[in-house]
Amino acid sequence: MSSENTEDSNARWVAYRPEIQILDCTIRDGGLINDHHFDDDFARTVYRTGVAAGVDYVEFGYKASKRIFSPDTYGKWKFCNEDDIRRIIEDEPGGPKITVMADAERTDYKEDFLPREQSVVDCYRIACYIHQIPTALDMVKDAHDKGYEAMLQLMAVSTVNMPDLEQALALAAESQAAGVYLVDSFGSLYSEQVRNFTKLYVKAMEGTDKVVGFHGHNNQQLAFANTVEAIVAGANRLDGTLNGIGRGAGNCPLELLIGFLHNPKFRLRPVLQTVQDVFLPLKQELDWGYSIPYAITGKLNQHPRAAIAMRASEAPDDYVSFYDAMTQEES
Amino acid sequence: MSSENTEDSNARWVAYRPEIQILDCTIRDGGLINDHHFDDDFARTVYRTGVAAGVDYVEFGYKASKRIFSPDTYGKWKFCNEDDIRRIIEDEPGGPKITVMADAERTDYKEDFLPREQSVVDCYRIACYIHQIPTALDMVKDAHDKGYEAMLQLMAVSTVNMPDLEQALALAAESQAAGVYLVDSFGSLYSEQVRNFTKLYVKAMEGTDKVVGFHGHNNQQLAFANTVEAIVAGANRLDGTLNGIGRGAGNCPLELLIGFLHNPKFRLRPVLQTVQDVFLPLKQELDWGYSIPYAITGKLNQHPRAAIAMRASEAPDDYVSFYDAMTQEES
């Protein structure tokens, strides 16, 4: 049906867009379920699956401040010490790039971002809310000046006023960031909204060489669909996780994303193998994926924390009471 | 972001399109999992949920030929006897319209479609493959002439050549059908394909008063997303099922569809109540929803029957062997 698609030159189903890169954030976003306590075997399997599947980036976790978060409580991937990552990747030649996320106001970046030559990390993803943009831009500069690729990720965009967002994107376009990520933090965005946001981000980066990325959540079973929308609208760096693992409803399943892309560098079979061997048993231990409470917070454009608490409560399936509580009058 | 949306006047998020109607096919498509053996309590609960939720149509099952299918093997909703439906609906005034599906070559329609005044059925949905279009059109005429609304549903459209499809749509436009359904039988269609197909169907019906509908499958977690795409492209009759129940990966979850639509006649709370009370326990008995084998058949544009057989086999989770078998060389 190519004649229908002339409005958008990206939509060439049989070909592929070589610029498209995949970031596997399984260990990082999956770690939000278990406070980043994945063991080395798990991390090594995920990393090696990334190598075999041909993904471009593998993300291990956060570079969180040890002043704020105790290593007695959180697992190693909350802090991503160099030695921990190095032990997993074993300097695989030609393997995926290594990314670590760093939250604004929760990272001692001046000390903890080492000079690049002392680090196995390739890219820091700087996550912030709209009021933290100045801090985040300082983190971007710090990472960039030390030799890293730095990506800027504005969270909770579905709650940001358009003029504020346009200002933030203009600042990002002038920054040292290698690109910006559209993040559907609450899993609340519908396809047209993703398309319009992505176009806005792409337009704001025009005239720079900055990439636009997309990270979705599956509250309304839209993480994969919205990732495809973002691709069609011009996003070239896409997040996915094995079997869609991630906090709450989870993320875009890597197996669907690779199934959709036609670039022969990506391979589906190793992803299926790891889902079968590791994630199927893991589902007996950890709770992720679509369920009604996450659909409700997504529809209501709310942080999933209420749904996460409800799923961990003694009434994890009292959907109607949860819906009533989430929609009661606010004072 | 309305300024971005001027290309498509349908995309008005805050308003709603009053023409949009919902068909709940829970009992019919869910019945494909258990050979239509749902008991009266279940059917009554689904029907009453449809009443409370404000859906426009409730579908009970098939009008299958008793010469081909034995009532000893199949449950009552395979045949939809008048008395069985009548016992459930109890002539609820102002309730949803009643639909029944009828497959081409598997229905004794001349005998079994009663004159409308003897029936509680409002609408027959005539399902066919491309080579059965003449039979299906005769069924449409028969149903129409007896006083029913008749919808034409061409299955497996993802495998039909475009010239054949255009011919079929032209015949449908000249027929007595009240409308045509775009059906993503294999759950293989991506959003742009749904958009383009829907536009093609809408264009083919131009100048008639026929409606275009959409029925999705969730093999690639796209049933809801594709339903939204179809809505944006002009489809006005949408299928959904409670908690997405349906054969294989299931259908568009009614709770997500109602959450998306803004028409105040639709109500989410009764849907959540029934999902909580009935479908959560039912999930312990029946297998539906996203899993890798269905994702594989969807990606490969294949009927899910191989995945259904594999899920019922002794190795329901050997994804890699299944993938290898489905992608081996064909002679």
Image: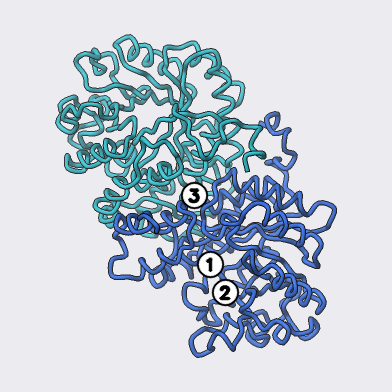
Chain colours: A cyan, B blue
Please, is residue B315 above or below residue A144 in the view? below
Question: B298 or B29: nearer the eye?
Answer: B298
Dot 2 falls on a residue whose secondary structure is helix
Residue type at the position of mark 3: Gln
Residue B86 in the image, given as x and y percentages of width and height: 68, 84
Residue A221 circle label: 3
- Crowd band around label 3 with a 10 angstrom C-alpha radius: few (<14), some (14–19), many (20+): many
Q: Judge if badges 1 and 2 mark residues of a common chain.
A: yes
Chain ID, mark 3: A
Q: Judge if badges 2 and 3 mark residues of a common chain.
A: no
Residue A146 appears anywhere in the view? yes
Q: Is residue A171 left or right of residue B214?
A: left
Residue type at the position of mark 2: Thr
Residue type at the position of mark 1: Thr
Residues at marks 2 and 3, CA–CA distance in whole angstroms: 25 Å
Dot 3 falls on a residue whose secondary structure is loop
Question: A293 or B176: nearer the eye?
Answer: B176
**Quadrant location of the N terminus of chain A in the rendered image:** top right
Residue A277 circle label: none
**Quadrant location of the C terminus of chain A in the rendered image:** top right
Pointer 1 or 2: first along the chain: 2
Chain ID, mark 2: B
Q: In the figure, residue B312 lies in which quadrant? A: bottom left
Q: Residue furthest front?
A: B331
C-beta proximity under 8 Å, tags 1 and 2: yes
